[in-house]
């Protein structure tokens, strides 16, 4: 006896494809690239292939706490990203690789103005330097 196939609408087929596609791990994409290609990509963004693989494993949300910290410091994320692009990318990389995400998230939730973050944040020097600059988005300057 022949098994009946389920009829799916084209829209449902596209939705299912997108769900499957979006669940794929970014690190799996490296399986389709040779080691030389991954090395070249890593070099292009200024890191090692190991760092690049680690970074992609962390996911795209891994630097979200940086955005929260910048907001707490009254730094306009868009302005910093536009004017200091390389610095902003480095901040994201360092934040993503940080081992203090849980502590940072807790302290941001409790009291974002508490200076305790300066004791453990690997981006403290860069954020402090950026915070001292007269950004146009700040009305008090």
Image (spheres, grey):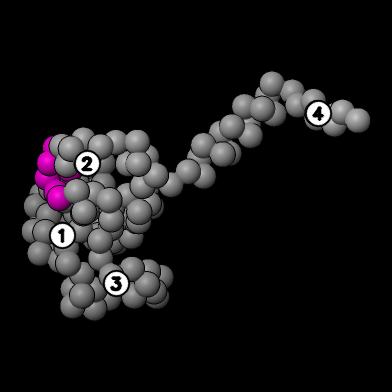
- The image quarter containing residue 38 is top left
In the depicted structure, whether residue 15 falls above or below residue 81: above
Task: Judge whether residue 115 can be spotted in this image.
Answer: no
Segment tinted magenta in the rendering: 41-48
Question: Can you identify the residue that label 1 sits on?
Answer: 127
> How far apart are the two marked residues, 4 and 3, measured between alpha carbons?
50 Å
Question: Can you identify the residue that label 3 sits on?
Answer: 100
Give the number of the mark in front: 3 or 1.
3
The answer to which of marks 2 and 4 sits earlier in the sequence is 4
Cβ atoms at labels 2 and 1 below 8 Å apart = no
Question: Whole-percent x and y of residue 77?
Answer: 26, 47
Look at 32% across and 49% down and name the residue there: 56
SS assignment at label 3: loop
> How far apart are the two marked residues, 4 and 1, measured between alpha carbons?
58 Å
The answer to which of marks 4 and 3 sits earlier in the sequence is 4
Work out which quarter of the rendered image holds the N terminus and state it. Answer: top right
SS assignment at label 1: helix
In the depicted structure, whether residue 39 falls above or below residue 110: above
In the image, 38 versus 119, the foreground residue is: 38
Left or right of 92 on screen, residue 22: right
Look at 25% across and 37% down and name the residue there: 34
């Amino acid at each position: 006896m022949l098994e009946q196939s389920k009829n799916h609408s084209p829209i449902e087929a596209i939705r299912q494809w997108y769900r499957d596609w979006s669940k794929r791990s970014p690190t799996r994409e490296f399986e389709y690239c040779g080691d030389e290609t991954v090395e070249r990509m890593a070099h292009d963004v200024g890191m090692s292939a190991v760092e690049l693989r680690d970074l992609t494993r962390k996911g795209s949300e891994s630097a979200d706490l940086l955005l929260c910290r910048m907001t707490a410091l009254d730094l306009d994320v868009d302005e910093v990203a536009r004017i200091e692009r390389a610095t902003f990318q480095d901040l994201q990389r360092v934040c993503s690789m940080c081992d203090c995400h849980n502590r940072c998230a807790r302290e941001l939730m409790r009291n974002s103005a508490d200076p305790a973050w300066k004791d453990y944040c690997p981006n403290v020097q860069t954020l402090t330097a950026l915070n001292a600059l007269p950004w146009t988005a700040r009305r008090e300057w």
